[in-house]
Amino acid sequence: MLYTVPSSHPCAVVEEALKIKGLDYRTVELPPGLSALVQRVRFGRRTVPGIKIGAERVVGSRPILRALEALEPEPPLLPDDPAALADVEEAERWGDEVLQEDTRWIVVEGLNNRPDALASFSEGSALPKIPSWL
C-alpha cells in the first residue's frame, strides 16, 4: 500500500519506480493538510510517500527506492558505477533537502497570490474536488 498526496513529485517518483519494477501496488491518496497527521500516526513521520512492503513500513522517496531495489533488483533503478551512484545520491539529496522545500514555498506563495488555481492542484486525483469557494 502506497500512501501519497496529489501533485507530490516524490510520490510520483515512487509510483514510477513501482511501475518500472513491475510491482503490484495500491495507492491511498491522502488529503493535503491532513496527510501529515495520518502519516505521523501510520509511519511515525509526517511526510509522504509512505509504503507498506509486507510488514515493513518505509517513508520517504529515497528509503522507499532503496527498499524496492532490495525487494526486486531488476531492472535496477540505480547505476552500478560508484561515481555515477554518488552523482545520483547527491542529486537525490539536493532534491529532498533543497528543491522540495523551495517547491513547497513556491506553491504556497503561488496559491496565496492565485487562490483560484487551488482547484487545479488536485487534477487527476481520486479525492473529492476542492470547492471553488474554498
Image: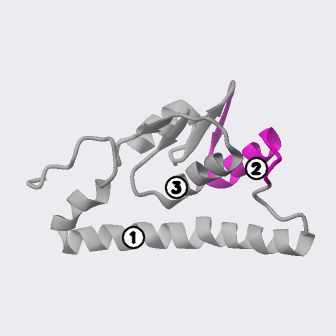
Magenta stretch in the rendered image: 56-75
Foreground label between 3 and 1: 3
Instruction: Read off the residue under disc 2.
Output: 66
Tell me if 133 is positioned left or right of 25 in this view: left
Q: CA distance from mark 3 to mark 1?
A: 19 Å
Q: Name the amino acid, label 2.
A: Arg
Alpha-carbon neighbours of circle 2 within 10 Å: few (<14), some, or many (≥20)? some
Label located before the other in sequence (3 or 1): 3
The residue depicted at 49 percent of the width and 68 percent of the height is 101
Percent x, y for residue 20? 67, 51
Q: Which residue bears the numbered disc 1?
A: 105
Q: Which residue is mark 3?
A: 12
Neighbour tally class for label 3: few under 14, some 14-19, many 20 plus, Cα within 10 Å? some
**Does the magenta run of residues contain 61?**
yes
Question: Secondary structure under badge 3?
Answer: helix
Residue 47 against residue 9 in the figure, above or below = above
